[in-house]
Image (spheres, rainbow, N blue to C red):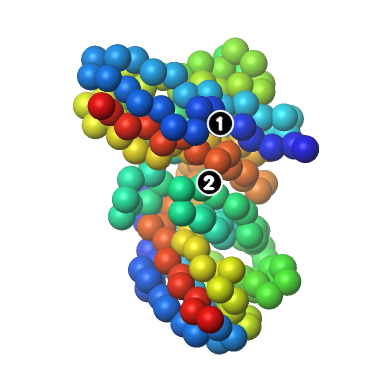
Amino acid sequence: KQEVTQIPAALSVPEGENLVLNCSFTDSAIYNLQWFRQDPGKGLTSLLLIQSSQREQTSGRLNASLDKSSGRSTLYIAASQPGDSATYLCAVRTQAGTALIFGKGTTLSVSS
Amino acid sequence: DGGITQSPKYLFRKEGQNVTLSCEQNLNHDAMYWYRQDPGQGLRLIYYSQIVNDFQKGDIAEGYSVSREKKESFPLTVTSAQKNPTAFYLCASDLGRNTEAFFGQGTRLTVV
């Protein structure tokens, strides 16, 4: 059964710092991996989708990488801002299933 | 604007009562999903539907029911058989397993 793990569970950084969030998954037979952002009490906002054939995707200050063979993805946030404070969720879509399987998330706090 | 609308935002249920959460999308997506989110846990799949008039149970379907009579709508009923329904419920949709998933803003259900 696919399991998704996100480390660390929480992270606090000062404004302007570059940071990396980690996601690992146990079954490398995936269609894609998606990173989401969730603000308190809100729904999920899609940040980046990486297909299994891709190595990375970029959107503004965000860069997500995928190493399918090792079961790892990272989300790199450049020049962090207080507005980046949120919970970041990683989810994979396996070839054996249909729906996304989620990690528990990393809660990021960026102080000014 | 295209998107997923969940209503109500907050819902209170009395013991032994059935309640229905609404999810409507105007993205012309074929697949729709219901997830449950509890503090400290990842999102867990309740039900999903890949086509009108068809749906499948997810990991925690007991005590819940759904219908998919229209492509745009996928309501979730929380029945009295669900013993611990207090949670944040999220609806999602996409065009299929190779595509980006989008989420609504969620419904917070509380048992009173």
Check whether the beta carbons of the residues at disc 2 and disc 1 lie within 8 A of each other: yes
- The answer to whether residue A43 shows anywhere in this view is yes
Question: In screen coordinates, is B50 left or right of B81?
Answer: right
Give the residue type that dot 1 points to.
Gln
Residue A48: percent from the left, percent from the top?
A: 64, 61
Q: On the image, which quarter does residue B108 sit in? A: top left
Tag 2, which secondary structure? loop
Q: Residue, x 64% and y 35% (percent of image)?
A: B4
Q: What mark, if any, has residue B108 been given in the picture? A: none
Above or below, comparing residue B18 to residue A109 in the picture? above
Above or below, comparing residue A55 to residue B7 in the picture? below
Chain identifier of the residue bearing label 2 in the image: A
Question: In screen coordinates, is A63 left or right of A20?
Answer: right
**Which residue position is annotated with label 2?**
A43
Q: Residue, x 24% and y 31% (percent of image)?
A: B84
**Which residue position is annotated with label 1?**
B6
